[in-house]
Image (cartoon, rainbow, N blue to C red):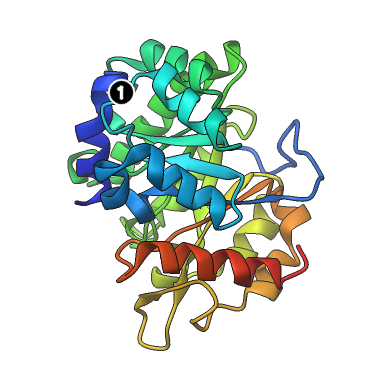
């Protein structure tokens, strides 16, 4: 099940500045896991999978769908396992209908960040499409901020395919206010798209409160964190400049999801974050 399909299946629960982002915190970032990695296990055994995630050492999780649970049930599952969920992935259509409900559900669960997980192709064919997307993001971000939450966008690699001589990712960053729209940088996908996260950290300091930690082998395939070639120490040395507060370990299609998240946690613990 692709991320967008998982989010759509779970959506019944809800239906230009280059300066330091206001409110950027300088604290030790937390090691979390994106539950998309264990989504098939979550579908079969929601509570048991949360127990396994906690047993692997994690204390923070990021959702990508709620598996037909109510906000109260999600929160109870977190509380029972000593977990918190600072962030959730949400479907793009909520930007146009259902955003207020998504805000209320996020508050009930305890999320701080509401992350749009991707943009469908029909909304990103031209740079003007991306500028209209920036307007949607701004309105959603302002509504979230009024309720004490923060809006963010999660990149893939398509944002780094040039359109009309520009990178859509650059246009999106230029067209949104960092106090309203943050970025959850996926460190695998930006590398897959041929770009350097360090360059973006330097150009847009404080804009990236969360990162997805996904590793890549020499052939460009996704592998468990620590089993690939991405230079994590170099990237994380810039964590203060980036504004990173949360790391979410992830693997989209691991052969053994629980082994994958356990390996990722162990490797992250070796990096002296």
Q: How many labels does the image show?
A: 1
Q: In this view, does 154 lie above or below 164?
A: above
Q: Is residue 212 above or below residue 151?
A: below
**What element does badge 1 sit on?**
helix
Residue 235 in sight in this render = yes
**Picture residue at 74% right of the left edge, 31% below the top:** 22
Q: In this view, does 64 lie above or below 247?
A: above
Query: x, y percentage for residue 60?
Result: 58, 43
Identify residue for label 1. 94
**Picture residue at 78% right of the left edge, 54% below the top:** 240
183 sits left or right of 34 in the view: right
The crowd level at tag 1 (other Cα within 10 Å; few <14, some 14-19, many 20+) is: some
Query: x, y percentage for residue 193?
Result: 39, 68
112 sits left or right of 3 in the view: right
**Between 145 and 195, which is closer to the camera in this rendering?**
145
**Picture residue at 59% right of the left edge, 51% below the top:** 58
**Between 95 and 218, which is closer to the camera in this rendering?**
218
Query: x, y percentage for residue 158?
Result: 32, 58
**Picture residue at 30% right of the left edge, 20% below the top:** 13
Residue 176 in sight in this render = no
Residue farthest along the right direction in this orientation? 26
Residue farthest along the bottom direction in this orientation? 218
124 sits left or right of 187 in the view: left
Query: x, y percentage for residue 196?
Result: 55, 69
Residue 45 occupies quadrant: top left
190 sits left or right of 32 in the view: left
The quarter of the image holding the C terminus is bottom right
């Amino acid at each position: 099940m692709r991320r967008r399909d998982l989010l759509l299946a779970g959506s019944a629960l809800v239906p230009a500045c280059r300066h330091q982002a206001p409110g950027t915190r300088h604290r030790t970032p937390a090691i979390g896991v994106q539950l998309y990695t264990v989504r098939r296990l979550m579908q079969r055994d929601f509570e048991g999978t949360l127990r396994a995630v906690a047993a692997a050492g994690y204390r923070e999780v990021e959702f990508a769908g709620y598996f037909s649970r109510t906000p109260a049930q999600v929160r109870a599952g977190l509380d029972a396992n000593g977990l918190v969920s600072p962030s959730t992935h949400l479907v793009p259509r909520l930007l146009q209908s259902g955003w207020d409900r998504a805000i209320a559900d996020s508050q009930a669960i305890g999320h701080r960040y509401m992350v749009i997980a991707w943009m469908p192709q029909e909304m990103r064919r031209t740079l003007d499409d991306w500028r209209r997307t920036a307007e949607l993001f701004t309105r959603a971000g302002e509504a979230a901020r009024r309720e004490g939450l923060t809006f963010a966008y999660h990149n893939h690699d398509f944002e780094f395919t040039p359109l009309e001589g520009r990178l859509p990712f650059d246009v999106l960053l230029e067209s949104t206010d960092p106090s309203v729209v943050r970025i959850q940088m996926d460190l695998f996908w930006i590398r897959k798209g041929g770009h350097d996260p360090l360059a973006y950290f330097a150009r847009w300091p404080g804009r990236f409160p969360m990162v997805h930690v996904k590793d890549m082998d020499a052939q460009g395939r996704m592998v468990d964190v620590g089993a690939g070639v991405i230079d994590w120490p170099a990237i994380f040395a810039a964590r203060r400049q980036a504004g990173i507060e949360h790391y979410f370990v992830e693997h989209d299609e691991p052969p053994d999801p629980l082994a994958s998240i356990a390996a990722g946690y162990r490797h992250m613990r070796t990096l002296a974050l």
